[in-house]
Structure formats: structure tokens, C-alpha cells
Image: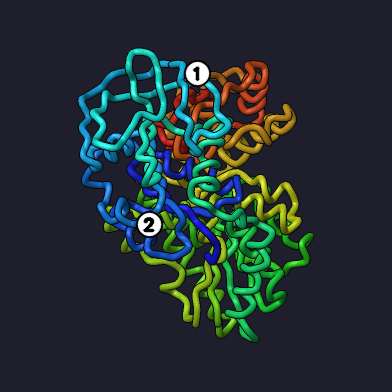
Amino acid sequence: MAGDMILVVDFGGYQARTMARMLRSDSVYCEIARPREALRTLNRSQCKGVLLAGEAADEALVDAGILAANRPVLAMGGAARGLCRALGGDDLGLQAEKKTALLSFADLPLFRGLVESDRYLNRVDMLELPQGVKPAAFAEGGMTPAFALEEKKIYGLQFYAEVNDPDGLRILHNFAYDVCGCEPWWRLDSFAEEAQKRVREAVGNGTALISISGGVDSAVCAVLAHRAVGAQLKCVYVNTGLMRLGETELVKQMFQSLGMELICVDATERFLQRLKGVADADEKRDAVADEMLHVVADKAAEIGEVDCLIQGTIYPDVLSERSSDNSAANDRRTLKDHIRFRRLLEPLRVLFKDEVRALGRVLDMPEELIHRQPFPEAGLAVRCLGEVTREKLAILGRADAIFREEVADAGLDKRIWQYFAVLTDVKTRGIRDGVPASEYALALRAVSSKDAISANYYRLPYDLIERVVERVTAEVPGVGRVLYDVTGKPPAMIEWE
């Protein structure tokens, strides 16, 4: 990207992504790098400052090159303690944790506009500050929640800027604009224009291909590319038989309303055959992913020569690939390994999920498409525990549709991050039509989250849960018991498999 930027160095945990998203919401472009990658990005001329965020307090992670680069540095959380030691100070151990304290701030550009206020402090250590470094925030008990080496514009805060925290937002704003001197240029309308221009130049007079999953990422990517090259873009949608009830027809209608031709492939039988006898969750994911590659590749061969392959990769995908130490995941083949093409385009690879949705609005896409919930690549195969069968998919599809209908009727569909049903592989005793029956237990899952890194279960109204239970057990033969999952992430993942 051509404009000013802040480099966010990830010291572990979710905080680096949170800080990056908050900066971008303030029109400041930023990128995330792991410590060993930081210097390469830092050497770019557009980099105006560095933000270190995360829980690792290892001074070895604070590269000396960062401190010698003559750019402002702001370290937050555990990274601030690591910065203190890297500067020559010492961490004398835990002083306070999980408490609220009244903080006052030194008269520094970083804290401009802040007044004395209460802040939640997850952890504050007693620090022995190196020569020239001074306390920058003050609290009772002699705590040093923040410090500064003002002459070099180096700051350390043992707390974070939280998402709904005006003072935290002000600190990030001050760092980017007042300390680093960034210009506000990051806007999604400008991004859309530039991205369309790049797609148009890359495709030229050739043909582009994109595989549509029905999710928001591929949908926004497809609309962006279609605005750039029109009918030169071929959109392939595969009905795997693992989609939510009514999903395929909904996707067709939405793309038709956008004036886009969708090449639909019904590969239900291929996927069910591939999943026959497969009960392990990872094996189901691999089977679905591999079969999808072959189905799309077969259709691409029918289309003919493909000049550009377009994929809806987004920034969290890029970050996950960088951080993955799983050799099997790194070696897994993708669509680009199955199709002959001249160039790979990933127009959304610098955007976070919330930015993808916002871009959809810039492109005037229907809200129903923009607000689609996250849906696993393997579809209902990983929400149907154990072996996947046609009968179990029919049961799950209908029960899930009832749950989604009731949530929407209650006006909660836009407020809940994700909600769905899971068909367990456990049958329990009950009564159906007056006779004993052994039927599946179904679980309901609803969570609130910002970015899926962490999540809390959503407190659904009891009367809503009662309506769902009554309808599912009455209208869906095969389900005799309904459970509600109240486990957060962590310790549980959002999906069951």
C-alpha cells in the first residue's frame, strides 16, 4: 500500500489484531508482523511507527533494530515489560493484577486529551526503569502502569486500548497522528476503486474465474471483480449438499439481483460418496476441501482457458498461514494447484472481516449478503457429528432452519455473531407419538464475538429457547432432545468440530 502505515508487531494473543482494527477504524493503515518479520516491514519508507502488542514479555522479541530505527515505538501489555528490559531496565515481578485503579497521566503528546480516570489493569509488574526512562502514568501504591523515553518517542503501557474504550482510542489516535505524524488516508471507498483498477489491469482482455462459497468473503470479492471486468468473470458455485436449508436458491437469487451470472454445479452425490464412512472431523474437512478442488477444476476445464484465478482470501487468512506450524496445513493443496492460470489475484487479502462487510456496503450489496454468518468450509459435515448421511443432513438442515427462523423473528439475527444447530451422534430415550423412541440429541449454539478469536455464549431469552425446542421436537422426527451450549471460547471453539 502506498500511504503512511503503522507496523503492529504481534507478541502473542489477540491484542495485536484488536489494536490493528482500531487503528484502521481511525483511517490509519497498519499491517501485522511477527517479531522475526518486523524489520523487513519496518524498512519500508511508508512505515511511520511501531506498535508492539501481546502478552509475551520476552525482551529477546524486541529486536534491537526496531529501537535503532529512529521511529516512534509504543509497546502495550506484556510487550511493554519486554521493552523495559530491552532498554536496560528490569522486571521485578507481579505488583497487581485484575484490578481497577485511578490513573493520572504525564503531560505527553501520547496522552493529549486524557484526564484522570479509572482503568482496568489485567497485570502490572514492578519495573526498574533504565536511565532516561521516566514514569508516564501514575497510580496508588507506586505502580508504574506506563513509562516513556520521550526523547526517542518510545513508550510502554502495561495495559491495552480496549475496543469500547474512548481513552484507549485516544491513545492510539495520538500515537498515530501526533507522535508518528501519519496522514489519514485509509478509506474503503478509495480501496474499492484501486482494487478494481488492479483487477482490470491484471485480467485485461482475458477470462477470470472465482469459486463462490456463499459466504461474505467470496461474495464481496466476486462483486468487486465483476464491477471491474463484467462478464469476463466466471463465478462458479458448488452445491455440496452440505449447505443450510434453502442456501443454494438464496445464493442464486442474490447474485441474479446483482446482475451476475452464476455457474451452478450440483455435486451432492460426489460429496456424500466421498464422506461415506468418514467420522473424524479433520478427515471430513480434508475430504470436502479436496473434493471441492476437483469439482471446481472440472468446471474450469469446461470453461476453457483461465487467465486469472481470483480468491476471496482476507487478512486473517494471511495471518493464520504465517503463524501456522502445522506442516500438514501448510502442505495442503489449494485451488491454484488444480487449475492452469496465468495470475492469482487476491483483492481482499489486506482486509479484516469487518472491513470486508463494510466494503460490501460501499459496493451497494444487499444487507442479507453482507451480514451472512460465518459458515465452515466443510459446511454441515462438521455440524453433523460422526459419519455424515443423507438422513442426518435432512434432520440437521430442518432443525437449523427452525432455529434461524425463530432467532430472526425475535429480531436478534443482526445482534448475534453466529448461531446454528449441531446434530450430535448421541441418541437418547424419549417418546414419539405415544411410544418409546430413541432419537438424536440436538445442540443449539449462539455466540457473541468481534473477530472469532474469543467468544461468549449469547444469552438467548428463555421463551425463545422454549419455542425452538417445541418446534424442533414436534416438526423434526429424529430429534428427541435439545440442548443449549453455554460454553465460551476459550475453552471451547465456536464450532463443535
Where on the picture, by quarter, is residue 461? top right
Which label sits in the foreground, 1 or 2? 1
> Observer-nearest residue: 206 or 407?
206
157 is higher (above) or lower (below) than 151: above
Secondary element at image label 1: strand
> Observer-nearest residue: 125 or 368?
125
Secondary element at image label 2: helix
Residue located farthest toward the top when viewing the structure as drawn: 141
For the point 42% across and 43% down, the residue is: 16
Judge the density around disc 1: few (<14), some (14-19), many (≥20) Cα neighbours within 10 Å: few
Instruction: Name the residue tied to disc 2.
Output: 321
Instruction: Name the residue tied to disc 1.
Output: 118
* Residue 266 in view of the camera: no
* Residue 240 in view of the camera: yes
Q: Is residue 12 left or right of residue 255?
A: left
> Observer-nearest residue: 286 or 142?
142
For the point 45% across and 20% down, the residue is: 103
Amino acid type, label 2: Glu
Judge the density around disc 2: few (<14), some (14-19), many (≥20) Cα neighbours within 10 Å: few
Amino acid type, label 1: Asp
For the point 72% across and 59% down, the residue is: 363
Mark 1 → mark 2, Cα distance in angstroms: 39 Å
Q: Where does the image place residue 15, in percent across and percent down from the top left?
A: 42, 39
Instruction: Name the disc covering residue 382, or none.
Output: none
